[in-house]
Image: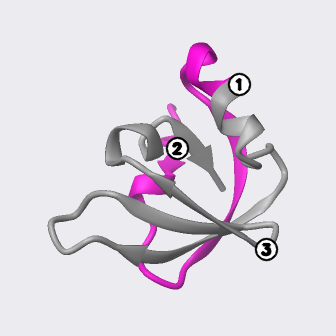
Amino acid sequence: MKVLSKTLAQLTKGETATITCFTDDLLALKLMEMGLIPGEKITLQHVAPLGCPYAFEVNGTLVSLRKSEAQLVQIS
């Protein structure tokens, strides 16, 4: 039985989750430099009116991601 993982793009406004891993190794370094580290709590703060970008709070910092980038971050 395959367990489906949830991504940052699936969070609802105000929802908090824990970052587990990234599905793109090339983007992972950029995201980690922005503070998205596996094990960190992350909260969706805002979504732009057209659905992209997203604003997440992680470790006291507001980080903006495109929807395509948010889909590459696995959470639990």
Cα distance between the residues tagged 1 and 2: 21 Å
- Say whether marks 1 and 2 touch (CB < 8 Å): no
Q: Position of residue 37 (x, y in %)?
A: 80, 44
Q: Earlier in the sequence, mark 3 or mark 2?
A: 2
Residue receiving disc 1: 29
What range of the chain is rendered magenta? Answer: 1-28
Looking at the image, which residue is at 22% across and 64% down? 51
Which residue reaches farthest top? 26
Applied colour scheme: one colour
Residue receiving disc 3: 60
Please tell me whether mark 1 sits on a helix, a strand or a loop: helix
Q: Name the disc covering residue 5, or none.
A: 2
Q: Look at the picture and state if 8 lies above or below 41.
A: above
Q: Position of residue 13 (x, y in %)?
A: 43, 81
Cα distance between the residues tagged 3 and 2: 25 Å
The amino acid type found where label 3 is placed reads: Gly
The amino acid type found where label 2 is placed reads: Ser
In the image, 1 versus 11, the foreground residue is 11
Looking at the image, which residue is at 49% across and 57% down? 64
In the image, 59 versus 15, the foreground residue is 59
In the image, 12 versus 33, the foreground residue is 33
Looking at the image, which residue is at 57% across and 24% down? 27
Please tell me whether mark 2 sits on a helix, a strand or a loop: loop
Q: Look at the picture and state if 38 lies above or below 57.
A: above
Q: Earlier in the sequence, mark 1 or mark 2?
A: 2
